[in-house]
Image: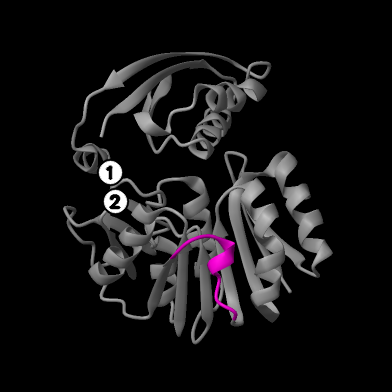
């Protein structure tokens, strides 16, 4: 598959501004990013590139910070090999060690998650995934029925299982993520994760004790009503993939419509992970 490579050069005042731009590019089809000293490279399959959508995605940032980009056509290459070469293991609070199959284990750390990164989102490197893992460590999952929306590589679903969840349903609309979740569950010898390819319309009609959703603000706002329908009374909802300002207040207002009470949130470089209870 041929890709377009966009080389972005930025002058920003805050690190999170680059994250905001990357997040917006992800929403219009860019699936691989490589950070550089003064910007980043963004990649998108040629067939998925839409210049009008790109211009629309970039528009909100032109008055916030200075950036420019150059477009180049990149011939077909082994993108999984490129992705893996940039993947480093992650240590979260000396409690969770996320590594790829080609890294050495650290048996002294209580929880180890082994993933084959491929090109699916959710390797644990992004602040939102790390904060979700931290929130999970602080709460009780034993015996719970868990739903992981926008599961990416399946890292949160795998962690839920390792924390004692009785059953985990992992959903993502991207077939690469769906397949990656199944493969990574096997890598971790986990047999209680059911993966489904789709969006809110494929959420099973059952009741969940815990729902995990690390996506983005607009998708969360669209799906939160469905989350409420399948969340048990006193059930817990963990949301991430958005910013503290202005997103958190917007998410809280929408959650309040369905009786979902805000409890606490974590913040890292203006990214947020928040907990709600029904």
**Decide: marks 1, 2 in contact (CB < 8 A)?**
yes
> Which residue is pictured at 43% across the width and 82% down the height?
164
* Between 179 and 34, the one nearer to me in the picture: 179
Specify whether 70 is left or right of 54: left
Q: Which element is circle 1 on?
A: loop
* Between 154 and 141, the one nearer to me in the picture: 154
Can you identify the residue that label 2 sits on?
A: 117
The answer to whether residue 200 is magenta is yes
Can you identify the residue that label 1 sits on?
A: 87
Residue stretch in magenta: 197-205
Which quadrant would the N terminus be assigned to in this image? top left
> Which residue is pictured at 65% across the width and 76% down the height?
230
The 10 Å Cα crowd at callout 2, few under 14, some 14 to 19, many 20 or more, is many
Sequence-earlier tag: 1 or 2? 1
> Which residue is pictured at 68% across the width and 54% down the height?
222
Specify whether 238 is left or right of 252: left
Circle nearer the viewer, 1 or 2: 2
């Amino acid at each position: 598959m041929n890709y377009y490579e966009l080389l972005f050069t930025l002058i920003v005042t805050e690190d999170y501004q680059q994250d905001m731009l990357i997040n917006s590019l992800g929403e219009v089809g860019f699936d691989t990013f490589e950070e550089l000293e003064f910007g980043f490279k963004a990649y998108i399959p040629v067939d998925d590139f839409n210049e009008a959508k790109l211009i629309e995605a970039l528009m909100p940032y032109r008055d916030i910070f200075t950036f420019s980009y150059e477009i180049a056509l990149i011939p077909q290459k082994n993108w999984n090999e490129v992705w893996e070469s940039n993947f480093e293991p992650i240590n979260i609070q000396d409690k969770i060690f996320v590594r790829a199959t080609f890294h050495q284990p650290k048996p002294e750390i209580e929880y180890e998650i082994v993933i084959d990164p491929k090109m699916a989102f959710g390797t644990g490197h992004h602040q939102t995934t790390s904060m979700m893992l931290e929130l999970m460590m602080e709460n009780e999952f034993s015996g719970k029925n868990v739903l992981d929306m926008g599961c990416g590589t399946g890292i949160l679903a795998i962690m839920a299982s390792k924390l004692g969840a009785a059953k985990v349903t992992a959903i993502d609309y991207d077939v690469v993520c769906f397949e990656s979740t199944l493969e990574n569950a096997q890598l971790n010898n986990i047999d209680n994760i059911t993966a489904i390819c789709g969006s809110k319309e494929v959420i099973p009609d059952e009741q969940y004790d815990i729902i995990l959703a690390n996506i983005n603000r607009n998708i969360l706002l669209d799906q939160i009503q469905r989350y409420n329908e399948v969340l048990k009374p006193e059930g817990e909802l963990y949301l991430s993939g958005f910013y503290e300002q202005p997103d958190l207040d917007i998410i809280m207002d929408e959650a309040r419509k369905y009786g979902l009470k805000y409890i606490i949130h974590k913040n890292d470089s203006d990214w947020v992970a928040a907990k709600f209870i029904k």
